[in-house]
Amino acid sequence: RGLCCGPRTGAPVPNGRGSKPTTRDGRGQLGTMRAPLWALVGCAPLIEARRLYGIFPGDDFLQDYWGPVRYAFNETFAGEFTRSFKMVDPTLTANCAADLDALKASGALAEGFYDRALPLGSCLTPDEIKAAILADGPASDAVIIGAARAGVGIDMYDDLLYADAPGNGATVFFVYGASPPTNNDPAINFYWTFDPDVTTAAQLVAAEMCRRFGRGVEHRVLKLYGNDQPAFDIRVDAQLEWLWENCEAKIISTTEARAKFDRDLAKELTKKALIHDPSITTILAANDRMLLGAREAIDETLSWEGAAKLMVAGFDRVEKSLLDDDFMVASADQYIGVAGAGLWRAVKNVLDAVDAAAGTANPIDSTNALKAYFKETTYDGINANRWEKCTADLEPYGASGDAWDTALAAASGDAWDAALALAGEADCNFYDEVTTETETSCQYADAEGFTVDALIHQTSYQATVAAKTDDNSPLPVTASVRELEIQTMDTAGGSFSATAWVDLQWKDTRLRYDRNVFEGPIRVDIDRIWVPEMYIHNLQTPEGLQLIKRLPAEVLPDGSVTYKFRTVGEYGCDMDTDLKNYPYDVHTCSLDVRVAESTNEIDIQDGDILEDIDGCEGWEKKVLKVGNKKTENKLEFRFKIERDSQFAVMSYVLVGWAFNLLGFTVFWIRAEGAGIDRSAVAITTILAAQFMMYEAKVTKVFTWLDWYFVIMLVYQFLAFILLVKSSRDYRQQQAAGGDEKFFIRVKAAQSKIRRRSKADDWTFWLFNLIFAGLETNALDRAARRIMVPSFFVVQIIISFVNPTDDFKSKVIWERAGFNSRLFWLNFVLLLFYVGLFVTAWFLGQFHEDESTELAHFKKAEKRVQEGMMRLETVIELHGADSLDVQTFFHKWRETTDKLRDREDTINRRRAMRTPQHDERRMQGGSWSSPPKHAPVGSVVAVVGATRLPRPPSVQKPRFIFDPTRVTWYWEETPERISQHAVVRPPYWVPFDEKAAAQLEEALVDERSLVQLIGTKYVADLRTMTQKNQQTSYSRRILREASS
């Protein structure tokens, strides 16, 4: 229509006039072009301009039905239609509300359709609608889709069809049965009707009742009709007929009531019917609105049990609440209020056919042209009618006892032809009609159950047959993991325990269903449909102990299936390589999903780990996802989990470090007389370290923690060896005479040193406490100064490297290193050592010359003592006259004076270098302050002369012991005192003469420790005790001298 090789004379240029006028409800649209472009020889592209209008009843009390219809029109032709109108009878304009609140208050519109009835807008009369359409342009460019309830607007449609002259009228599509227009000339005008197939819709409702309540059920029926038109009565009658014919229903009685589609009237009629016959079991209504009233009557009339037994069916699908609470079994859906479906799909199909024929030799521009479109088919360039025979009311083949069997029995020729002739076979002429029956459906209270039954039970679906793609390629199956929770990690066994949900998704085209019936998803037991043979490949839990929960499969309307199952168990994971870094180990494990089908059947695809992964106790809570790995028909969902190193560090590493420091304290404990057994401390720390090493062992693999314990034990054994050597040297020194006076004089000399401030005092004290002075045993001093700092250095180094992995592991560097408490603890202590050393150096607390002076002083003291012993020996053996005693004593006093003068000189020099407060020292005969950077005091303040005259060499006089004057005793226990013949009360037992002489000689020589000859005892004359060297048992000794 209106197509030529250029713009039509007098016709408006499409969209050339600018924007179309908008309606008062704001839904006006630009005119659009539906016709395709055709490239014809010698002709420019042709474009058909079309203005699309929708006209629907606008009465408020009808909006539960027509509101969704108008909404469906707007949505189906969104962006294409020009305007949509709400039409009202000119004498009943008050029935059309201008706002939604008034409509809600009236109760005329079902609550579930408030939004679908929008936009409300204002209602227009038929004349106003016609004027608005013609104001937009000529009627010939208009396509009108609408309805005429109760004859309202028929004259308007007549006028628009005819317009100003035959052939210039609009195209009119009725979306529901209406009286034919009086001005309709099918050869000129274009008029068509689209009627929903209400019979099929009613039969679908009956089929659902049969499915829900079973076959052969007795029915006492209340039929609620609408108005007097037979077209509406079929809504109820078709249901009852189908139940009787196909469900073996036993119709016991029927009660008919005509409620005029009115809620209140339906309530009254239903109430009276139930009072008259409370045994009614079934209520069939011509629309849902009447069931609202019927429900009120049921609540007032029947008990709860009686109401629950009723079988109720409706029509029009406008009261969804009745389906939601299962009051109504099902409601027929005419598919007139669903955008893009049912009636609206049929309208679009016709418009598409019109568009496709535009520009051809046979355009569809009239009613007869559309009839010809259905009648004739073009084949090899020839138009011909290829429809042959049509039959009506053909009974099922083989039905017994009916006309079909009679025809088959009486047929003399072809039985089939005879039966068809009897059934009413005739030449097809359906294309002579001007009505298209459109698809209808049904809405169900148990929509999911209906859909499942329709897919599984009422079809030939086979669960043993695998789903396939359209091109027979491998079926894509997407696997994903969610809610993965790690429960335990068994690094020694190489496994982890976890729970997870595994989802499989694929598409089975055999399971598609109508989303308008049920939005989905439906849930189907996995035994009733095909699912891939899937299993967890690295699951180690025995089959009898596996805890697997399988959920029903979820199926979407497009056939997409989701199968979910929960797996709980123990899964294998290779951890030996990464375990070398324990307790800083990081492991990459996976949940391996595998399908039994071959790669030619299934293409397994990665759906990833959908949610965060929860860690377990002893490991970091945040578990990292890493890239998944696909190998043939196996998919590895990999994750990286890090051990919480703080537990092992606090339980083993730092405790072991503390035990090492405890073992080092033996170098700060005196060898004798401190009240603490140094060897016991060392052995205790070694045993504790061994126990911790075995306790911390988690695998046969040699780990970083094992190396840490090895280093710890090496230092502890080294400390024990040095301790044994130091203690032995001390005992030998004391047994040889000792040098107690020297230590006493050193302490006294140190206490006399005057320093500049309290800070200097504290530095001096700390330096001697940490690094030790020359008064400390040489091995103890070396351990304090070298061994302990080296331990800190080694601890810092091992905080960054792993010797097990050839020092190449980056994990220790990243997870420990500067983040490790072990590093910072050792770093701080090492820094303290270095800082104390540097501070003492700059404060002049020690110098090489002063240390040398101490050594010389010690040697000089020994020479003096040797001279005294020689002198005593000479006097004892030869008498005083055999030697020039005066000369000897002169030399001895000269040497002693030099030592004392030297000591005084050093003391005065130190006093002058270390002033206190504002005191000034005399230098060179005048008062002056010392130099700014003058050195300060040292650990020793005395020094001996560099060259001392040695006394003459004499022999030590022989010691003579007199047992009659001196007696030595040892203390026995009360239990054993009776075993000795000679005792001194209460528990003293005398030493033998040889041991007593040895003790007396040591006392004379001022030696504190004495190794008793022939025994395992060492006597300490300072504490007057003797100790068993093997058992460390100690007891007292006593010296008694007579006058």
Image: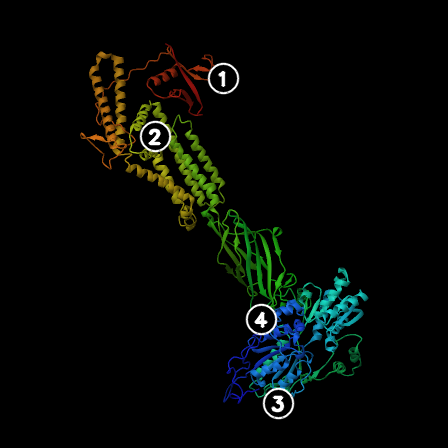
Residue wearing tag 3 = 166
Answer with the quarter of the image where residue 683 lies.
top left
**Amino acid under disc 4:** Asp
Residue wearing tag 4 = 470
* Res 974 label: 1
Q: Kindly check if marks 4 and 1 are in contact, taking CB atoms under 8 A apart as contact.
A: no
Q: CA distance from mark 1 to mark 2?
A: 39 Å
Q: Residues within 10 Å of mark 2 (few under 14, many from 20)?
A: some
Query: What secondary structure is found at the residue carrying circle 1?
Result: loop
Q: Earlier in the sequence, mark 4 or mark 1?
A: 4
Residue 306 percent across, percent down from the top left: 77, 61
Q: Residues within 10 Å of mark 4 (few under 14, many from 20)?
A: few
Residue 92, compared with residue 983, is above or below; it is below
Which mark lies nearer to you, 4 or 1?
Answer: 1
Q: Earlier in the sequence, mark 2 or mark 4?
A: 4
Query: What secondary structure is found at the residue carrying circle 2?
Result: loop
Q: Earlier in the sequence, mark 2 or mark 3?
A: 3
Q: Kindly check if marks 1 and 3 are in contact, taking CB atoms under 8 A apart as contact.
A: no
Residue 280 percent across, percent down from the top left: 79, 66
Residue 580, compared with residue 24, is above or below; it is above
Q: Kindly check if marks 1 and 2 are in contact, taking CB atoms under 8 A apart as contact.
A: no
In depth, the one of 186 and 962 nearer the eye is 186
**Amino acid under disc 1:** Pro
Residue wearing tag 2 = 777
